[in-house]
Amino acid sequence: MSDGPGSGRPSGPLVVLVGAMGAGKTTVATLLAEAYGVTARDTDTDVEAAEGRSISDIFVESGEAHFRALERDAVASALASHTGVLSLGGGAVLDETTRELLAGHRVVFLRVGLAEAVKRVGLGAGRPLLFGNVRARIKATLEERAPIYESVATVVVDTDETSPDDVARRIQEALTP
């Protein structure tokens, strides 16, 4: 693993994946982790494990502000301790502290278009921010967050009409010195 993207870098994740729901962050993180011989970690999964309930339940029972605080803590912990591939929840970059913590890390923005995101997300079951008109909510979310994702990214990879394997390969190529 000595020639992976983290060679000569301080501790922390080899790569951090950001992007909207449906971009393929979790799938691509798993593929990259396998390719690099490291583990993949997802901060949404960390939040659910710490709380013992789903993100949807956290939103409904405790509110979005509570979830965002948990998410901020999960990201900070993972950035400090995880040395593999890290996937952040779609809204994690909305937090200014999280954006500051991402500075200096290799951050890849997996960009997904509206049609592809809608196709991948489906009716949004289990996605609390999509209650109501799914297409309109995804469109608004993409428009709101795209500039933020771009601002924290060191690499941008388009995922539309591209297999997860090809996305992972593109990331590896982009991160190879």
Image (cartoon, helix red, strand yellow):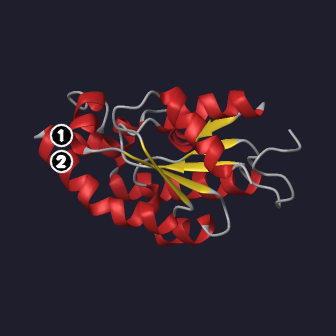
- Identify whether 148 is placed above or below 71: below
Query: Residue 170 in the image: x percent, y percent?
Result: 56, 41
Question: Which disc, if any, is residue 131?
Answer: 1
Q: Secondary structure at mark 2?
A: helix
Q: Viewed as shown, does residue 54 lie left or right of 7?
A: left
- The residue at 37%/47% (across/down) is 20
Is any atom of residue 52 visible in this view? no
Q: Is residue 55 left or right of residue 77?
A: left
- Residue 174 marker: none
146, 94: nearer the viewer: 146
* Residue 87 left/right relative to 23: right
Q: Quadrant for residue 60, please give it.
A: top left
Q: Label 1: how many residues lie within 10 Å, few (<14), some (14-19) or many (20+)? A: few
On the image, which quarter does residue 106 sit in? bottom right
Q: Please give the residue where the numbered disc 2 appears in the rendered image.
A: 137
- Pinpoint residue 50: horizontal percent, then vertical percent: 58, 40
Residue 126 locus on image (x, y percent): 31, 31
Residue depicted at 53% across the width and 39% down the height: 51
Q: If the image is split into quadrants, where does the C terminus sit?
A: bottom right
Task: For mark 1, give the secondary structure.
Answer: loop
Q: Do labels 2 and 1 touch, CB within 8 Å?
A: yes
Inspect the image, locate mark 1, and give the three-letter code of the amino acid beneath it.
Answer: Phe
The residue depicted at 63 percent of the width and 59 percent of the height is 76
Q: Badge 2: few (under 14), some or many (20 or more) residues near its Cα, within 10 Å?
A: some
